[in-house]
Image: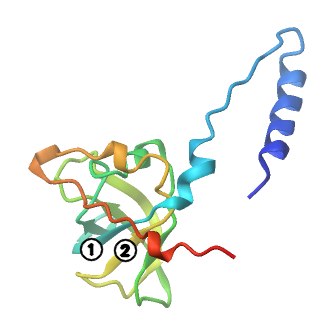
Amino acid sequence: IPKVKDILDVVDRVLKTELPDHPVTLAVEPGRGIIATAAAMSSRLLLRTPRSDGEWLHLDVGIYHGLNEALDRIVYPITVAHRTGAETAYTLCGPTCDSADTISKGQKLPGSVKEGDLFVFDMVGAYCECLFTRFNGIKPPLVHFLDDLVHTS
């Protein structure tokens, strides 16, 4: 991951090149860069569905349960517990039956995934919990704090 200063140097250079007669004051809200790694979200695979456009994986969480930023094409790193091997491209969706509840398309995951498997979405610490809803009457995920896993050197 590049350092913030390196990113801002590039942005500054581009702004000065592209808008030389219009000085720009840039304000940055670095929420994701600071806190994204502080949380992960777990989910279970409810159903695999073959469709004409490929295989869909229906999870017990979706965009209405904290993964709303997937609508803005935020890509979360995903791990499937105890699954390895050749990857297959899937469409991941949530449990709501709403066509907007699509987490990602073309998501590469092990081809051996099965219903009941545990999926872990990393890097959700920035905005996940504040985006929980009760859409379609589905309760938001539980939040667990794991302070005892924090180690200092």
At 37% from the left edge and 55% from the top edge, which residue is drawn?
103
Residue highlighted by disc 2:
119
At 80% from the left edge and 37% from the top edge, which residue is drawn?
8
Relative height, residue 79 to residue 21 (above, below) = below
What secondary structure is marked by label 1?
Answer: strand
Q: Is residue 96 left or right of residue 130?
A: left
Q: Nearer the viewer, residue 7 or 114?
A: 7
Dots 2 and 1: beta carbons under 8 Å?
Answer: yes
What secondary structure is marked by label 2?
Answer: strand
Q: Position of residue 126 (x, y in %)?
A: 49, 48
Specify the quadrant that holds the N terminus.
bottom right
Relative height, residue 19 to residue 44 (above, below) = above
Q: Nearer the viewer, residue 59 or 143?
A: 143
Residue highlighted by disc 1:
44
Tell me the kind of residue under disc 2. Phe
Q: Position of residue 33 (x, y in %)?
A: 63, 49
Mark positioned earlier in the residue sequence (2 or 1): 1
Q: CA distance from mark 2 to mark 1?
A: 6 Å
Tell me the kind of residue under disc 1. Arg
Q: Residues within 10 Å of mark 2 (few under 14, many from 20)?
A: many
At 85% from the left edge and 45% from the top edge, which residue is drawn?
6
Specify the quadrant that holds the C terminus.
bottom right
Task: Find residue 57 and name its label.
Answer: none
Q: Is residue 38 left or right of residue 95?
A: right
Q: Position of residue 26 (x, y in %)?
A: 73, 23
Relative height, residue 113 to residue 66 (above, below) = below
